[in-house]
Amino acid sequence: MRRRSVLLASACTGGAAVAGNAFIGRPAMAWFRGLPAPRWQLPMPAFLGVGAAYYGVVGYVLARSIDRRDARSTAWSLAVLVGNEAWNGIFFGRRSTRAGFVGLCAFLVPLAALQRSVAGDARARNALAPYTAHVLLYDLPWTYRLWRLDPARPSGTSA
C-alpha cells in the first residue's frame, strides 16, 4: 500500500475514534456498568480489544480501498466508521439499550455493503470477515439481550 493511503485511512479512523468515544465519559460508563448484563457478556478489557481491532481492520480496509481507487469500498468504509461512531452516540449518549439495539440493526446495512464491496479484494475481505462475524454472532444478540434485560428505560423512549 502507498504511504498516502495509509496516512489518509489512519487520519479517518483516528478522527472517528476520538469523535465517537467523546460520548463515553465517566457518567456513561457508570450507566453501562450498572446495566443488568447477559452472563456471556465480554469483560471490559475484551470490549476494548475488539474496539482496537475494529479500528485497525477498518483502517486497513479503507487504506486498501483508497490505494485501489475503489470509490465504492472507500465510501462504505467511511459509512461504517460514521455508523459505528453514531452507535456510540446513540447507545452511550442517550443511555438507551433499546436505541443501541436498533442502532446496531441499522449499522448492519453499511457493514454488509462494505463486506460485499470488498469481495473482489481477498486481503480486505479476509481482514473484514472476522469483524463482520463478530457483529452478527456476538454484538447483535448481545445488544438485543441487553435491551431485554434493562428494566429502566430513559424518559422519552418506549419499550
Image (cartoon, rainbow, N blue to C red):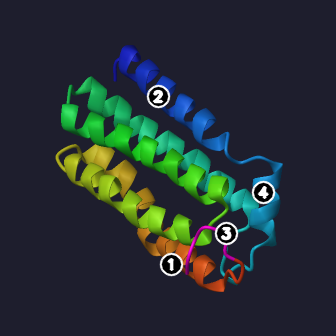
Q: Which numbered marker is on residue 141?
A: 1
Q: Amino acid at mark 3?
A: Ser
At 46% from the left and 68% from the top, the residue drawn is 102
Q: CA distance from mark 2 to mark 1?
A: 29 Å
User: Which callout, 4 or 2, points at the residue further toward the start of the chain?
Assistant: 2
Report helix, strand or loop for mark 1.
helix
Q: Is residue 14 above or below residue 84?
A: above
Q: State the quadrant of the N terminus.
A: top left
For disc 2, the marked residue is: 12
For disc 4, the marked residue is: 29
Q: Is residue 28 above or below residue 82?
A: below
Marks 4 & 2, CB-CB < 8 Å contact? no
Select label 2 or label 3 by which is in front.
Answer: 3
For disc 3, the marked residue is: 155
Q: State the quadrant of the C terminus.
A: bottom right
Q: Amino acid at mark 4?
A: Met
At 59% from the left and 78% from the top, the residue drawn is 147
Question: For the view shown, which residue lies furthest in the left direction?
Answer: 120
Marks 2 & 3, CB-CB < 8 Å contact? no
- Badge 2 crowding class, 10 Å Cα cut-off, few under 14, some 14 to 19, many 20 or more, is many
Q: Amino acid at mark 2?
A: Cys
Question: For the view shown, which residue lies furthest in the top direction?
Answer: 4
Q: CA distance from mark 4 to mark 2?
A: 25 Å
Report helix, strand or loop for mark 3.
loop
Q: Amino acid at mark 1?
A: Pro
Residue 10 lies in the magenta-colored region = no
